[in-house]
Image: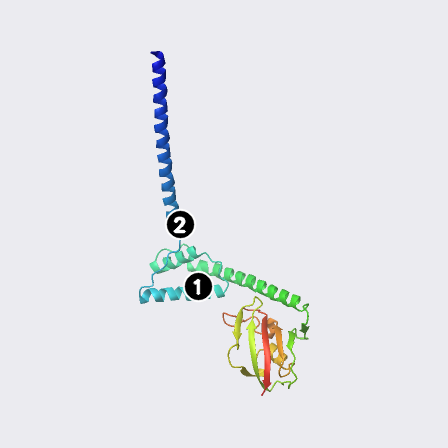
């Protein structure tokens, strides 16, 4: 009888163990499924919300946002906190109490924009100066007294223009990172006045012969200097041109 009780107890324990294991497995599967659902929800929340530009007001509002952002970036404000920026815009438009009053914020904004512009300018100057210093050591590079660097690719034997001449050229202009900002490639050659272009071009053209093809490297002071030119040529940019002097007119 005692043996029967022991055997019955063991069977009951095994049965309970088997049932408990099934329950645990089911619970674990349910937790895994819930975890997967939570992860999918988090990933969805992380995805940027696309604004539906469904009417004129929304399109105008979006366009104003792009203009504001472009203006801020061009002045060095590309490290601004977008969440705080949006909060400031909302508070003004909604008429809410400003967390920082305008007369208190203006000096902070001016100091910040000045500092970031100075840092950006210093970085640009350093990068372009370093490029020219390294480039002048390259094979075939010649440097004039003004700092103009050039390399002869093809030698012509035609006329040499003077400052008052007009010339016809083919060219491609690049920044030191290889970005092409202008080119006559695939188009008709361009006619221009030697003394009516940036200083580096004026100098280089008067050293070339008809038929010459050169690569010229213009320090910023022989190009657009601290102003830059539009959005394509930043301030203090060294400019690289492949120039073919087709003819002196």
Q: Residues within 10 Å of mark 2 (few under 14, many from 20)?
A: few
Identify the colour scheme used.
rainbow
Q: Is residue 240 visible?
A: yes
The location of residue 78, given as percent across then percent down, is 48, 60
The location of residue 5, given as percent across then percent down, is 34, 15
The answer to whether the residue labelled 2 contacts the one labelled 1, judged by CB atoms less than 8 Å apart, is no
Q: Is residue 117 above or below residue 215?
A: above
Q: Is residue 233 visible?
A: no
- Work out which residue is located at the far left of the displayed protein and give it: 55
Image-based side of 121 in relation to 96, left or right:
right
The image quadrant where one finds the N terminus is top left
Q: Residues within 10 Å of mark 1 (few under 14, many from 20)?
A: some
Read off the residue under disc 2. 43
- Work out which residue is located at the far bottom of the displayed protein and give it: 249
Residue for point 36% across, 22% down: 13
Image-based side of 128 in relation to 3, left or right:
right
The image quadrant where one finds the C terminus is bottom right
Give SS at disc 2: helix
Residue for point 35% across, 12% down: 2
Answer with the quarter of the image where residue 121 lies: bottom right
Residue for point 59% across, 77% down: 243
Q: Which mark is residue 69?
A: 1
Q: Is residue 20 above or below residue 111?
A: above
Q: Earlier in the sequence, mark 2 or mark 1?
A: 2
Residue for point 41% across, 65% down: 66
Say which of 125 and 177 sits in front.
177
Give the distance between the C-alpha atoms of the residues marked 2 and 1, in whole angstroms: 27 Å
Give SS at disc 1: helix
Q: Which mark is residue 133?
A: none
């Amino acid at each position: 009888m005692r043996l029967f009780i022991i055997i019955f107890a063991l069977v009951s324990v095994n049965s309970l163990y088997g049932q408990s294991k099934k329950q645990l497995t089911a619970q674990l599967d349910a937790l895994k499924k819930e975890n997967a659902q939570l992860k999918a929800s988090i990933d969805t929340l992380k995805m940027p919300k696309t604004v539906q530009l469904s009417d004129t007001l929304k399109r105008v509002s979006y366009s104003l946002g792009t203009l504001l952002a472009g203006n801020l970036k061009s002045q060095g404000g590309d490290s601004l906190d977008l969440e705080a920026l949006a909060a400031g815009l909302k508070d003004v438009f909604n008429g809410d109490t400003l967390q920082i009053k305008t007369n208190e914020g203006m000096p902070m904004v001016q100091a910040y924009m000045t500092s970031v512009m100075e840092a950006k300018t210093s970085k640009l100057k350093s990068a372009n100066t370093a490029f020219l210093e390294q480039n002048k050591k390259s094979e075939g590079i010649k440097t004039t007294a003004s700092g103009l660097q050039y390399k002869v690719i093809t030698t012509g034997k035609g006329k040499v223009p003077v400052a008052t001449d007009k010339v016809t050229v083919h060219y491609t202009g690049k920044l030191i990172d290889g970005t092409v900002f202008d080119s006559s490639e695939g188009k008709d050659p361009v006619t221009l006045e030697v003394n009516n272009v940036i200083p580096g071009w004026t100098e280089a053209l008067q050293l070339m012969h008809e038929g010459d093809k050169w690569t010229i490297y213009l320090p910023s002071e022989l190009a657009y200097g601290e102003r830059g030119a539009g959005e394509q040529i930043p301030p203090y940019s060294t400019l690289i041109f492949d120039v073919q002097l087709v003819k002196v007119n």
